[in-house]
Image (cartoon, rainbow, N blue to C red):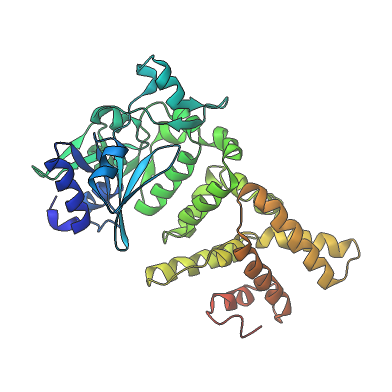
Amino acid sequence: VSRSMISEPAKKVLHRLNKSGYEAYLVGGGVRDILLGGQPKDFDIATNATPEEVHDLFRNSRLIGRRFRIVHVVFGREIIEVTTFRGNARDTDDDLADDEHKTSEHGLLLRDNVYGNQEEDALRRDFTINALYYCIRDFSIIDFANGVQDLKNRQIRLIGDPETRYREDPVRMLRAIRFAAKLDFEIEPETEAPIRELAPLLAHIPPARLFDEVLKLFSAGHGEATYHLLQDYGLLAPLFPETARAIDAGEPDELILQALRNTDARIAQGKSVTPYFLFAAMLWPALQVEWRRRQDNGDPVQPALHGAIGKVIGRQVQATAIPKRFSGPMKEIWELQMRLPRRQGKRAFGTMTHPRFRAAY
């Protein structure tokens, strides 16, 4: 691994921690992406210094988080995330560990501030390919979980017992999908086996967190592949319950696929993607079903649409919180669809991908 692949701010943080007598390593996706020949988007560092000790070393840092306390060291627009090695609370029997490591009745990890050593930290991470450490002192890769081999085999493998790890944090199921789509890797058989059965556990995740996870899933430039994987593993329903129900009942999803292809193409060109466009597309089949139902019950076209919009968004926010600043433009997009001569057609929805779709409306 060449140091030239690592940003100057990340090198500064590593060097200062090392000079101050602490262990510090580049960890996670940054190491994975470098080994795969890519340029990492961001750099994370793991250390045996506590969050408070890291915070004291860097004036340009802030302590954040409750579930996991971490430090953000800020260099202009670049943020280096520094985490303390995490241990396994089950190995410590004092009251402090019990207080710092809490799980819910479903096995969901609520708080996890037990510190440990580097090997414990590696085995607490989610996937083997994200548990690789780079040592800047001797350019070595430290691999406790056989992650390098999984990179070579192009597979996503959870560390530990998959069912236990998914119960601790059901969002790991979505992360497995995200990495499989992004890296074009297979999900290893034992890692994929419990997903369909445990998919309903996503209902225990706060809707605001799921909203963020949906954006991560579909904003990485592999939206179409992600969508197919979510369907295959039964994970579309917990994220978009009404859409999944509509598609199961025969409503076409061609418009979703078209919108995702468009989104993927925009991301490949370095353009931005708006969350309201994504959600308007993902909820289109659900809206169609509800809109038709209201018209069949005798509502005129326009009031039927307005009622359907309120109903569909109202149900969706129970699964993924949609901030008001996005639900407004979603309504505009759907109303625009109705005004276009070919509102049922694929072409009509395509006009919204135009940056000036409001002018057309």
Left of 113 or right of it: where is 257? right
Q: Position of residue 79 (x, y in %)?
A: 31, 55
Q: Is residue 227 above or below residue 276?
A: above
Q: Position of residue 316 (x, y in %)?
A: 67, 53
Q: Is residue 80 above or below residue 201?
A: below
Q: Residue furthest left?
A: 138
Q: Quadrant of the C terminus?
A: bottom right
Q: Is residue 16 above or below residue 266?
A: above
Q: Position of residue 87 (x, y in %)?
A: 33, 27
Q: How many marks?
A: 0
Left of 136 or right of it: where is 225? right
- Tell which of 17 and 236 is nearer to you: 17
Q: What is the quadrant of residue 70 in the picture?
A: top left
Q: Is residue 358 above or below residue 266?
A: below
Left of 54 or right of it: where is 328? right
Residue at point 70% right, 80% down? 340
Q: What is the quadrant of residue 137 in the picture?
A: top left
Q: Position of residue 327 (x, y in %)?
A: 64, 63
Residue at point 18% right, 43% down? 17
- Tell which of 53 and 140 is nearer to you: 53
Left of 329 or right of it: where is 192? left
Residue at point 11% right, 45% down? 139
Q: Is residue 335 visible?
A: yes
Q: Residue furthest right?
A: 298
- Tell which of 53 and 295 is nearer to you: 53
- Tell which of 191 and 39 is nearer to you: 39
Q: Is residue 280 visible?
A: no
